[in-house]
Image (cartoon, rainbow, N blue to C red):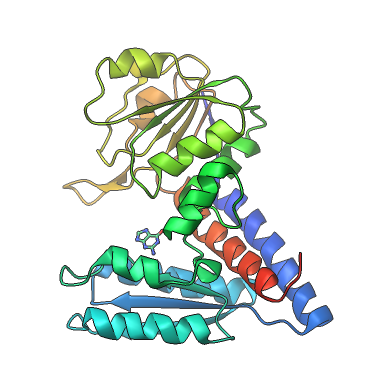
Amino acid sequence: MAQIIDGKAVSAAVKNEVAAEAARLRDEKGLKVGLAVVIVGSDPASRVYVNNKKKACEAVGFQSFEYALEESTTQEQLLDLVNVLNRDDRVNGILVQLPLPKHIDEKAVINAISPAKDVDAFHPENVGRIMIGEYSFLPCTPAGVMRLIESTGTDITGKQCVVIGRSNIVGKPQAMLLLQKNGTVTICHSKTKNLKEICLGADILVVAIGRANFITGDMIKEGAVVIDVGMNRLDNGKLCGDVEFESAEKKASFITPVPGGVGPMTIAMLMKNTLTAAKQQAGIE
Ligand code: GUN
């Protein structure tokens, strides 16, 4: 039976580290850390995420600046705001909550964010830096997954790592991070043949495909570390991951629950990135 990885506890530990460092910077250098969060429209899920980000800022002692814009906001207006935030010294990190309304080109907005303030690490410059291992920020979810794997005491070197999902936000950067830790990495996706066979070879399995209960216990190697990035809402209103937990926990050595696994890590890593941004902008480290 697997040990359950407590994402809330690991997330709290990261936030405590960030809060302690933020307090030190404030006391010793007079530095205040600030995050701007921009939301366009009234998508309820995005609203919840943005509120959680604001609360996390308060908890670690950052200032947060929220910009809640109407659904009808034009791309030009949004780009103007991003440019103002790029120049605002109180703002160390800028996060534009995705998805944006359909009339706005997400890529144009991401490209407009100063790479030095791009705490999501979505800007092409930051994405490229991850490829060559010279990054300041890691995208929050893959970075959180790495921290969870680390919390199990698993050494990634030489391990067969299988990432299911190839999104720009999770799957692709996740594969790069596992590779940098000397894992032997396979990326699978919806068109992969022999998925079960490949999964059965995985010592570390990271699942981010966005399909409820897609990976079942019979696809998991005995003793594997299983990280479930999925967050799906079933017809009965219950949240579930991309991994069928009941059958998977019988095979895995460690497994993340949903909720309470990867989810809490994403915001903790966002706080860490914002602190890093503030330090770099102040010329510290
Ligand atoms: N929407 C869902 N997840 C994210 C995220 O990590 N960052 C941003 N900006 N938007 C999101």
* Residue 33: percent from left, percent from top: 63, 78
- Indicate which quadrant contains ligand 1: bottom left
Work out whether residue 113 or residue 19 is closer to the camera in this orientation and state it. 113
Seen at 50% across and 56% down, the residue is 126
Q: Is residue 226 left or right of residue 209?
A: right
The image position of residue 283, as x and y in percent, is: 73, 72
Answer with the quarter of the image where residue 246 lies.
top left
The image shows residue 263, relative to residue 82, as above or below, that is above
Which image quarter is the C terminus in? bottom right
Q: Which residue is drawn at 31% across and 27% down?
A: 215
Horizontal side of 153 relative to 130 (left or right) equals right
| Residue 138 in sight in this render | yes
Residue nearer the viewer, 95 or 87? 87
Name above or below for residue 130 compared with residue 216.
below
Q: Is residue 178 placed above or below 84 in the rendered structure?
A: above
Tag count in the figure?
0
Q: Can residue 256 be seen in this view?
A: no
* Residue at the (61%, 61%) spot, across then down: 272
Q: Which residue lies furthest to the right in this view?
A: 28
Q: Is residue 137 left or right of residue 276?
A: left
Q: Residue 189: x percent and y percent?
A: 28, 31
Name which residue lies at 74% across and 67% down: 21
x and y percent of residue 143 in the render? 54, 48
